[in-house]
Image (cartoon, grey):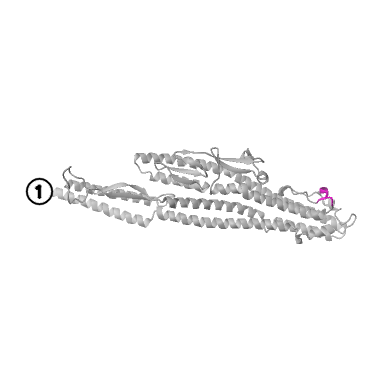
Amino acid sequence: MSTFSGINLASRGLSAAQRGMEVTGQNIANANTPGYTRQRLDQTEATAATDGLWSSRKDVPGDGVEITGITRIADAFVDARKRQDAATAAEQRTASAVLTQVDTGLGEPGKGSLTQRLTDLYKSWGDLGTASGEDAAGPARTTVMARSAAVSDTLKSLDTSLQQQWGNLRDNTSILADDINGTAAHVAELNLAVRKAVNAGTSPNELMDQRDVYVNHLTDLTGARVTPGKDGTVDVYLGNAVLVSGVHAEKVTVAASAGTPATSVEPRYLSLDQVKGDGGKVFLKVGTLAVAPDSGTLKATLDAVNTALPTIAKQYDAAAASIAKSVNDIYNPDLPHDPAKDFYRVPATAASLTTVPTKGTDLAGRDSAPGTVDRSVAKALGQLPETAASPSRVWRDTVTSIASTAQAAESRAVLAGQVALKSDAAREAVSGVNMDEEMTNLVTFQHAYSASARVLSAINESLDTLINLVR
């Protein structure tokens, strides 16, 4: 090896050590950057070249070091697991929030709750049944009407609150779809930038990190699947449709159907009554293909719109029907049945529960026999909570069902969140920046740089001595 080959060897060592310090510095600088994947300098020893076709160089250590690239330290399996667990956590968190809002809105137990309104109604009937004389019965009948209206108003308030929550979630599907479209467009743009970087021979690592942030957001929303494409790109699948293919992104739209047979309607015109009545639903389309998210925030939102809240609305309707039937069976037991003599009109929905009488004096003929004031009907209605047909039992079952469902959803959300944290920790263990490790690498590269500089300095001193001897 010539002296000048030694200079080249030392120069390569300096360049490799300097690049190693730069990569290490990049890792340290981005230690707290969301989505950053640590990088590693890849290098190999350079082999000694021959001087000619028939000659060889013996006892030569080589030509130093060669930099082969800068690698992102990532594990595809760990990343996929993190995305899947994060999407599941987002789904469960959203589902829990929806059910918790419903449960909180019931106000059970509480002074303004339906349970308390029913209790007050039973008591007013009991007071009417024990009222002595018509002078006492008149105000008691007025109280019955007021408390009956309070029951109706409470049910209507609960139904209205549920309708508003459902409408907000229905509209939120369009907002989430716009978010998906914007994010998918960013993924496609970064795919193009990554492809250009790969083809130009430059490092696409930072572009891939930026793309992964958008990809992770897509999976949080929809549980989308990610597969590697060509030239460093990725393809993203939503359900059974391709959302991002290379540098092209498809559009997600929100659609709805209602009626029997189902016909297409504008999502903003679809109502909760249609969904719970004729099976209307809100769904997604990629192009012309209907798709269903595998998990994520949007899946939980669609499930709430199409299943969870309509089911609760039916429970409200059943509670209203139970109140009407239980009271009417005692208040108007005559056969053949005359609906005009009922106390409650049989409601189609919870919001439509109303009384047939419009004022307290209309109750005058509801004693056991015309012209009497024994008020046996009122007494029987005052004892309604003690019977098997009590609407309070139906409502209590409804409250218990909603509360237990909300509690179970919260437990699932907590568990899914813990699993997601573990998956994120596993990803950080592979791809995250460890400051202790980076400091060690920095010291190593620093010593390597100093040593290569010392080699270069020694060669320089040798050359200087040689030149001075031959002058």
Residue 456 at x, y percent in the picture: 21, 49
Q: Which residues are magenta?
A: 335-342
Residue 34: x and y, percent?
Answer: 44, 50
Compared across the picture, whether 182 is left or right of 119 comes to left
Residue located at (68% from left, 57% from top) = 397
Q: Quadrant of the C terminus?
A: top left
**Residue in front for this viewpoint, 191 or 432:** 191
Whether 364 is among the magenta residues is no
Quadrant in the picture for residue 118: bottom right
Task: Look at the numbered disc 1 and give the secondary structure of its residue.
Answer: helix
Residue 336 in the magenta stretch? The answer is yes
Count neighbours of disc 1 (C-alpha within 10 A) and say few if under 14, some if 14 to 19, many if 20 or more.
few
Relative image position of residue 117 (x, y in whole percent): 73, 56
Against 186, is 28 above or below? below
Residue kind at label 1, given as amino acid type: Leu
Residue 432 can be seen in this image: no
Residue designated by label 1: 469
Secondary structure character of the magenta stretch overall: loop
Q: Is 426 left, or right, of 439 in this rendering?
A: right
